[in-house]
Image (cartoon, helix red, strand yellow):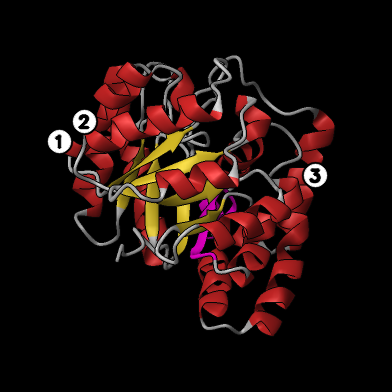
Amino acid sequence: MKTPLFTGSGVAIVTPFNHETVDLEALRRLLDFQLENGTDAVIVCGTTGEAATMSYAERMRTIECCVEHVNGRVPVIAGTGSNSTENALALSRDAERAGADGLLLVTPYYNKASQAGLIRHFQVIADGVDVPLILYDVPSRTGVTIAPETYAELAKHPNINGVKEAGGNFSNIQKTRNLCPEDFSIWSGNDDETAAICMLGGKGVISVVANVLPAEMHRLTELCLRNDFAAAGKLQLELKDFCDAMFCDVNPIPVKTALNLLGWDVGPLRLPLCDPTEAGLEKIRAALEKHGLTSRV
């Protein structure tokens, strides 16, 4: 029986940059904020962490910094996905050596692999490491969807722990839950779907919003895991407008902008990502003000 890599709210943490490289001191401050506010896991170098525009050396330094600073207090899960199976395997092995508790593997983007190709890709990586894998289904960014039947095949591998499901297809999520064993975990990959996915047996969320609202996202998942879906549903609805604001532009543009507005100094976005429009900036500011966040930092 597989144990979930984590339950609750895992933050998909942003990567703070200065004008040269990763700002590790700023990253440590963010990690302290997360740990002080109940975050249950840290997911580093994922989509929100702008891993696609980081060098290999930067990614490894960032993963190593997280592992060292968190120091076993919560699981650290490293994003090691790539559209090349060979590169993803190399990253995964290095992240394991750096002390990551688990790995987050996005579907290979651009190649548009078949379902058979996806199975082989993930199995090769799972065979090559000794830490658990979380698959990452986000077709809006990769052009590929993992089918429920493919999950059922991958769930047989002892190192494949579950999936971060960001496809927004609740029919597929239900099919996946019915086809896969109980110990194949599902985490929400969309903040505004957290309670609904947990109601279908999900184990929590890998959250963008938790960068700004870690205590609230922890509370939301805590209510879900206690099966108090009346209270969870109410909190989910209260957070809906904030979730929308954090996705009013391409992630992580809004959340990184919000952190900078709150004084966290997480630095610039890396091209091809750029600052939000004036309209987007106003939505972000309005959401921060509505939720009383300007006084938190």
Q: Amino acid at mark 2?
A: Arg
Which quarter of the figure has residue 153?
top left
Local crowd size for mark 1, using a 10 Å CA cut-off: few (<14), some (14–19), many (≥20): few
* CA gap, disc 3 and disc 1: 42 Å
Residue with the mark numbered 2? 93
Instruction: Check if mark 1's residue and mark 2's residue have beta carbons within 8 Å.
Output: yes
Residue with the mark numbered 3? 283
The residue sitting at 67% across, 25% down in the picture is 275
Q: Circle 3 — which element?
A: helix
- The span shown in magenta is 202-214
Q: Circle 1 — which element?
A: helix
Q: Circle 2 — which element?
A: helix
Which quarter of the figure has residue 231?
bottom right
- Relative to residue 247, is residue 176 drawn left or right? left
Local crowd size for mark 2, using a 10 Å CA cut-off: few (<14), some (14–19), many (≥20): some
| Residue closest to the eye, 83 or 254 | 83
